[in-house]
Image: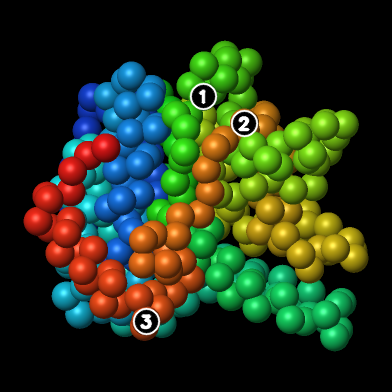
Amino acid sequence: MATSCTTSLATNVSMTSDVQCKVAVALSGEVSWSLPDNLENLAHFVVSAARRPGCLFVHGYANRDDGWIATLRSMAQRVPGVRGVAIEGRSSRHGVASLIADCTRSSFVHLADELRRRNGGRRSRLGSMIYSAPMFRNIWLSVFMARHAAPHAEFIVRARVDHRLKMPLDWAAVAAASARGRMCVGLRRQHYATQVGGVPVAVRCVADDQFAVGPPALIELYARVFADFWRLLLLLPLWRIDMIGHTNERIVAAQLRFRRVPYEFLPIDGGIYHHRCGCAATRRVLLNCTRCGERRAAELNASHVRVV
C-alpha cells in the first residue's frame, strides 16, 4: 500500500494507545461544534451499552484553521474514552488532494468523468462526487487509527462524526452476527423493513456508508474503499441508469463483494444530528451558526464536557 494512503496532514495530533480497549469507535467526517456532544452520545449508547472497555478515535476535517481546531480538539479530548483526535484544516486541502490522487491513481476523477459522459444533462447530482474521495479517505484513516492504537479490540464501530443514536446499540445482534462470521452494516430502522426484505445480501447493489460494526479484520476490509478504489472502479455498475444516485452506497456494496466480506444489516435508531443551534453538523460550518456554536463551546468548557 502506498504511503499516501495512510498519511494524515492533521497537525498536533493527539494519540494514545489503549491495550485495554475492547470496543473501538472510529469516527470520521467534517467536524463542527457538535463533535463533543456526539462523542458523549456514542460513548453512552455504543461503548457503555457494550459493557466492555471502550475507546474513541476521530479523523476529520474542518473548513477553517485558526485556533478553532485546537479548541475543538481540546474539548473532544475531555470526553472520557477519547484516545485519538486528528483534524485537518482548510490549509491542508491541496496536500490532501495530492494524496488522494496518488493513492487512488485519480480513479475518483475518472469515475466522475465517466458518469458525466454517460449521463449527459443529468449532471446536477455529480457534485456529490467531490466529497466521495475525502469521505472514504477519512473513514479509512479513522479505522486505521483504531486498528493501531487499540490492538486488542474485539469490535470496531465506524460512525460519522455527526451521527447520534437514540437507543443503545443492539450488541446481542452484533455478537450473533460475529459468531456467524459476519460484520453488520447499520440501516436506520424506518428504512430496514422496506429495504431488506426479499433481496439476498450477496446481490444487493447498495449498502449504507454511515454506520458499521464488527470484528476488526472485517471492518478494516469494509473501510479500505479509499486504498482499494483504483481496482474497485472496474467492478462498479456504471451501466445502470440509476448509478448517478446513491453512488457512495453502491461503492460500499461493491467493496464488500470485492473483498468478499460477509455481512448483514442491523437496524439502528439514530441519524444525522442537527444540534441546538439549528445547524447541520457536517458539509460546512455555516456563518450564521458561528455565534451559537461559540456559545455552545463556552458551555462545554464550563461544564468540562459532562458525560451522559
Estimate the spatial distance between the alpha carbons at disc 1 and disc 2, rounded to whole Å. Answer: 8 Å
The disc labelled 1 sits on which kind of residue? Asp
Pick the front one: 158 or 6: 158
| Residue at the image point whose x is 62% and y is 33% from the top | 267
Which mark identifies residue 266? Answer: 2
Say if 143 sits above or below 236 in the image. Answer: above
Estimate the spatial distance between the alpha carbons at disc 2 and disc 3, rounded to whole Å. Answer: 37 Å
194 with respect to 57 (left or right): right
Say if 285 sits above or below 304 in the image. Answer: below
| Residue at the image point whose x is 87% and y is 31% from the top | 198
| Residue at the image point whose x is 38% and y is 22% from the top | 50
- Confirm or deny contact between disc 1 and disc 2 (CB under 8 A): yes
Task: Identify residue for label 3.
Answer: 288
Say if 178 sits above or below 217 in the image. Answer: above
Q: Secondary structure at mark 3?
A: helix
Task: Identify residue for label 1.
Answer: 170
| Disc number lying in front (3 or 1) | 3
Say if 165 sits above or below 151 in the image. Answer: below
The local crowd at label 3, few if under 14, some if 14 to 19, many if 20 or more residues have their Cα within 10 Å, is: few
The disc labelled 2 sits on which kind of residue? Leu
* Quarter in which the C terminus is drawn: top left
From this viewpoint, which residue is outermost toward the bottom? 121
Spot occupied by residue 105 in the image (x, y as percentages of width and height): 59, 69
Q: Earlier in the sequence, mark 1 or mark 2?
A: 1
The disc labelled 3 sits on which kind of residue? Asn
